[in-house]
Amino acid sequence: MKSAFFFSLDLPSREFIELSVGKAKDQRVGFLLQIDIKSGILSESKEVARSNYDAMVEVARECSGSAVLLLSQESGHIGVSHDEIALGRRIEEQGIGFGIVSCDGSRVKILNLPRYVAQNKLLNIDQLEDLIAPSGNLQKLFEGYEDRKAQRKMLRLVAEKYNKGGSALVEAGTGVGKSLAYLIPAASWGALNGEVSVVSTSTINLQQQIVTKEIPLVEQLTGSKIKWALVKGRNNYFSIRRLKLARSQQTQLFNNDRSKQLERIAGWAEKTRDGSLSDMDFVPHQDVWDEIKSDSDVCLGSSCPSFQTCHYQNSRRDISKANLLVVNHHLLLSDSWAKNSDTANPQRPVLPKYKRLVIDEAHNLEDVATTQFGTRIDTDGISRILERFSSKGSGLLVAISNSLEKNPENPELVKIKNSLDENFQSILSSAKESIELLLTIIEEKIHPFVPGSSQTVAMDFPDVDVNYLIVRASERLCSSLENLRKKTKSVRMALEMETTSEPNEHILDLISSENSLEEIVSGVQLVFSGDHQEGSHVRWIEWSSNSKRSNRNLIIQSMPIEPGTTMRNALFSEMDTLILTSATLSTLGSFDFVKTRFGFGSDETDPGSRNLTLTEMMLASEFDFGTRSLLAIPTDFPDVRNSGVLHRERTAEVIAEMARHVNGGVLVLCTSWESLVEITQLLREIPNLKLPILVQGEDTRTRLLEKHMKNSKGVLMGVGSFWEGIDLPGAALRAVIIPRIPFSVPSTPINAARIDRYSSRGEDPFKEFMLPVATLKLKQGFGRLIRSSKDSGVVVILDKRIVSKSYGSQMRDSLPNAEVVSGSWETIRVRLKEFCGLFEPGQ
């Protein structure tokens, strides 16, 4: 514990503390205040807990950086005990201050200051740059060292934003080495000032690269140990207590196959390193994982017998000790949403308070925010909640009833049991009927459920009667679920009154069910209310008949059309240092598109608008694309829009020919699952093509990449996530084939709403939205080719619109400066043979 600092309370806080301590009598009271470090005055006092240190720590987790938690003493003497020192350390881990206050508020002793009011020490930018400059530590570590001027330039900018504060938008092309450029300043700042930096990525590959490769390298360069933590969401961890409970009840919970999987998990649990899903060598069924995952609703906290060995709690301890946190975009935005949520039952924030943020792979941020800031409800999910209560005679109600039968002498418990038998079943039946009614209206009034298919429609039904029926059905569903929630709460409260103080699993399960029902009701009301967030969200429904749980499933969604404003106000504007970076952020040499999508430069008439000044930096790739890469565009190829089957047949032929030319090492990037499946089938039908064909969906992404690296003479085919975050150096990747320009589907509800938004402003939605999105995606796909200075290869785009349409030149100009060859496939074939003969793998 640091030396104590003595501060004073303002008069209202002093009077408030004296009054509160008097009312609390013998209880220790925790108070939360704000500190002015210059004046030495503490103010804005409010009581947060009495004699409950765990509750005080929970409050500390959600406090602002200038907050101080004061613990009252019983008398004017403010000595410090061992218990108070221990509490102070726990509070300090949350980034806020801690101290002791006398019972009359006359004296305050601050044992540690808030993390963000201490005077920061500045980074020596020249010294940091020297680490990676010629003759620096990086050159000493690597024999093949090459000076990267762009990397040094980016490092200086990031370090400057740490020293002076501010925001920057940095496009760092392939080979710049942007990870080191931001990690060195971030880690050095944490070591110097003890302040937390958060680094967020969108792909698991980059997260793993940062913690297994980049951070150890930074430690070598700087000569100091970095306090870091890889942060995962709570539901990624299993609960030791819940696993034991599920195993004891597995005959009631699962069928034989699920029980076998539970036992497999139990074996894994004994040897797992971190207790998270990513440490598993198999994917558990969702039903099984739901029964054993760590869940705040049923967590016993420090009362749990497994608290000290709990993997999730251990991860929280690691987080509290770290000053460099590596997260993903989903967790980053979920945490931000939780901290700014004003809902009745908000999620608990995962991250401590922080003011320094680096967002890598920032080009994906808007897509993640669209999902994270939206609402999704599905009838299968609601049915799973209902099955918790009554599932083939073995649900929660039966378990509670069987437990209560053991106490027939207690009249209150008998009453509770009778209420379970009498009222719950009718309420459950009403809820199930409400779901069925909603499904029936959709099927009869909008579109029938077609076996094995799914449909999507925006919720702007022109038929007033249909709209009325759907709204009324949703209201009935909410009413029945709310009745169930209230009944659940009444049973839970009655059980709490009649049971011992020891943890009761049934009560915890009821609390979890209560919260789930409240969340569902809130979501359904939000989506179906006619004027909810009018104009800012798009609502739609999807329904299908291929659900594993039932013949029909309905998904109801609401998503923000432009989440940039929320990101800016709830996240970006809260940062002292903000770095947004990626290899693909610009289109036509400008950041205008992504700045708009991120909410920068928004209309100042927006009452929530907080303008942020961005420093912009574009750093070109360090690699010689002009010499070592070729962009081939055949113009005699079938039109991708009008001759789908013929185009796919020719695509399969080109893939086979290219694979033979370069002896494998081919990556095919499709734009839809349908085209991926059809092209794969056509490719496998080509005679004498004796090359392994690895296809996304036929194995995990990780295992596909491992197989391809081991046998680099094959063809790897993917869609979606395969367009980015893949590193296949040398012979593993000699050619990238892109059958179609990756334009987004304009008819999806979210894209249609965004197109309408651009049109309503008098802007061209294709030019201002669809084209930039496709260009950034195309840049990502092209970027898979060259991953080191020794790599070489060919990109083949089999969509002649990139040369025949006026916008094609804009897309080509945004790509790396490769040699371009276009014309007939015969002409291209000649140049390909020449080019591929120039470079052998690794040459």
Image (cartoon, helix red, strand yellow):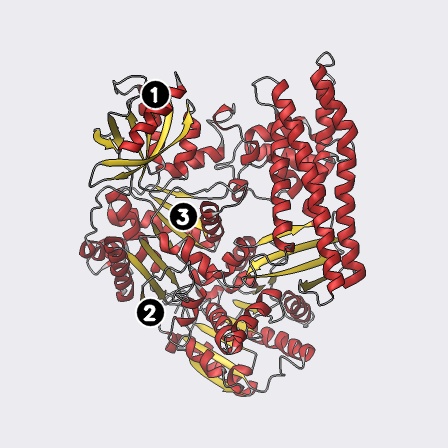
Res 292 quadrant in image: top right
Whether pointer 3 and pointer 1 mark residues with C-beta atoms closer than 8 Å, the reply is: no
Describe the element under mark 3 as helix, strand or loop: strand
Q: Quadrant of the N terminus?
A: top left
Mark 2–mark 3 distance (CA, rounded to whole Å): 24 Å
- Packing grade of label 3 (10 A; few <14, some 14-19, many >=20) is many
Is mark 2 in CB contact (under 8 Å) with mark 3? Answer: no
Q: Badge 1: few (under 14), some or many (20 or more) residues near its Cα, within 10 Å?
A: few
Disc 3 residue type (three-letter): Val
How far apart marks 1 and 2 lie (CA) works out to 53 Å
Q: Position of residue 193 (x, y in %)?
A: 25, 43
Instruction: Tell me, for residue 83, which label it has, or none.
Output: 1
Q: Is residue 289 left or right of residue 77?
A: right
Residue 326 — which label? 3
Choose top left, top right, bottom left or bottom right for residue 536.
Answer: bottom right
* Residue 833, above or below 418: below
